[in-house]
Each structure stands twice: as structure tokens, then as C-alpha cells.
Image (cartoon, rainbow, N blue to C red):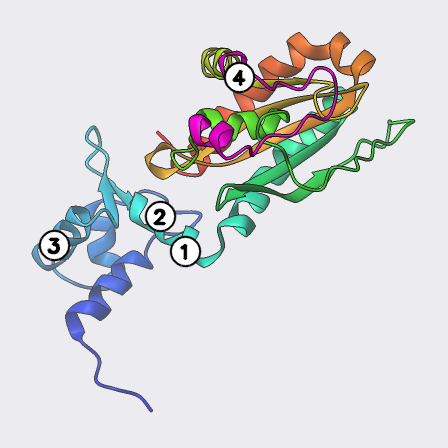
Amino acid sequence: MEGKLIQSVQRAIDIINCFTEEDHELSLKDISEKVNLSKSTVHGILSTLLKNSFIEQNPLSSYYSLGPAFMEKSFLINEDLLLKNLGRKYLEEISQNFSVTANIFSYKNKHLHLIDRVTSPNLYYSISTSVKKIPLNASASGKLALAYSEELNIDKLFENLEINKYTNTTIMEKDELLKEIDKIRKDGFSMEKSEVEEGIYCISVPVFKLKNKFIGTISVMGTKEKLSKIKINLSKEMVKVSKELSKELGCL
């Protein structure tokens, strides 16, 4: 059953629908012509949308475009799907350029979950792990969560004995883990050196969304020999990817 249409709301929707892949930015005149309304009427609606961040205005050209509020609302639909869709091309680039397997992990409720993986066709070996839950104190992605998530507290982690020893290099001391966290924040990436499984190395970078909120990681796992050789170039590329993907997700 159709209800009564509110004219002002419909006009605002019509203005929003003016923006497409071909028309990212539009002038007041452009929008006025598209919706067949006077400039003064359109300007009033734009001012309201602008105040609520559904529209933003280029300070140099005065042109209008869709605002950050749409990005924030899109996460309510399916954050994992958006992260996977936007991150896929980066996984493919990393996998192809460095002949590695690249992963995306999403972070929710203090846990990391694998949502996508790209394996290089050039790999002559495969890596499997018996660890099902990503450990926070040992894994590269887990240490990123400790470094950037507002929900996690290292003191409580140790107080509640939520740490496990997997290998001889697993970090089990709080002071050592705190030093590692400081290094991660400085470098922009996390390194795992046989801390979960012997002979397996991992490099991970954080992914952020609006308001610089940590939502996941991009991670590469490989043998010690493989990642040791390409660590410098790979880590630089992954830090770059971290910034680019986070920007696409609305992080400034």
C-alpha cells in the first residue's frame, strides 16, 4: 500500500540520485537543471544535506558531491562484504607481485575472522595451520588488534590468562608485548616470526574505516625463508595498501 509522499523528502532523494559514477561532482546549476527546480530551492535542500554530512562541498570549486554519511551507513548493511569487495584488488596485486598468499581478516567482538584469500598460482607449496582462533599475543594480525582496537586491554589479557604459548618464540611477557605494540605503531605493520607455528612467518597491516576505527587486517603468510627475503619490499607495499584501502573506507 502506497502512502503519501513528502515532497521535500522526495526532492532531497532526487538530488542525491543526481550523483552517479559519471557525475561525482556537480555544480548548483547542474543539479538545478537535473531535478528541474530553482537554484534557491536546491540550495536550501543541499544546505540541509550538507549539515548532516550526506553532501559535501569542494571549497575550491564549490561543486557538490556525496558526503561521508553514506559511507558510514553503508557499514550497517554489511561491513564484511564491503571490506571484501574493496580489498580484493589489493589482495590480487600483492599475491601476483610477490607470489604469496594474501588474506583479509575482519575484526569484530574482539575476534579476527578470515573473509577472503588470494593464492598465487606461482606457489609451489601450500601452508595450512592447525590454529583455528587467531591468537592476539602471537599472530601478526592479533598484535595489530591489540595495537589499534579500542576494545582490547593488554593488562586484562594477562590478568584473565587469555594468552597461550604455541612455540618457543611466542610472546608471553607483558613488557615484551608492549614493546612489540609500540614498534608496530611506529612501523605501520606487524611481523610474526614462528610465534604460532614453527617455520611460518607473517606480515600484516591494519585497515581502518571512518573515525579511524580499526576493522581488520591484510595479511601475508609464508615460510621463514620466503618472507625473510622479501620483507623490506613487501612491508613497504603493504603499508601503502593499508593507507589506500583505509582511505577508500572513509578513514582520513
Residue 15 location, quadrant: bottom left
Residue 19: tell me if it is visible. yes
Label pair 2/4, CB-CB below 8 angstroms: no
Q: Amino acid at mark 1?
A: Leu
Circle nearer the viewer, 3 or 4? 4
Q: Amino acid at mark 3?
A: Lys
Q: Position of residue 39 (x, y in %)?
A: 12, 54
Q: Position of residue 229 (x, y in %)?
A: 76, 8
* Main SS, magenta residues: loop
Say if the magenta span includes residue 26.
no
The residue beneath circle 4 is: 177
Upstream in sequence: badge 3 or badge 4: 3
Q: Amino acid at mark 2?
A: Glu
Circle nearer the viewer, 3 or 1? 1
Residue 244: tell me if it is visible. no
Q: Which numbered tag is attached to residue 76?
A: 1
Q: Is residue 11 above or below residue 93?
A: below
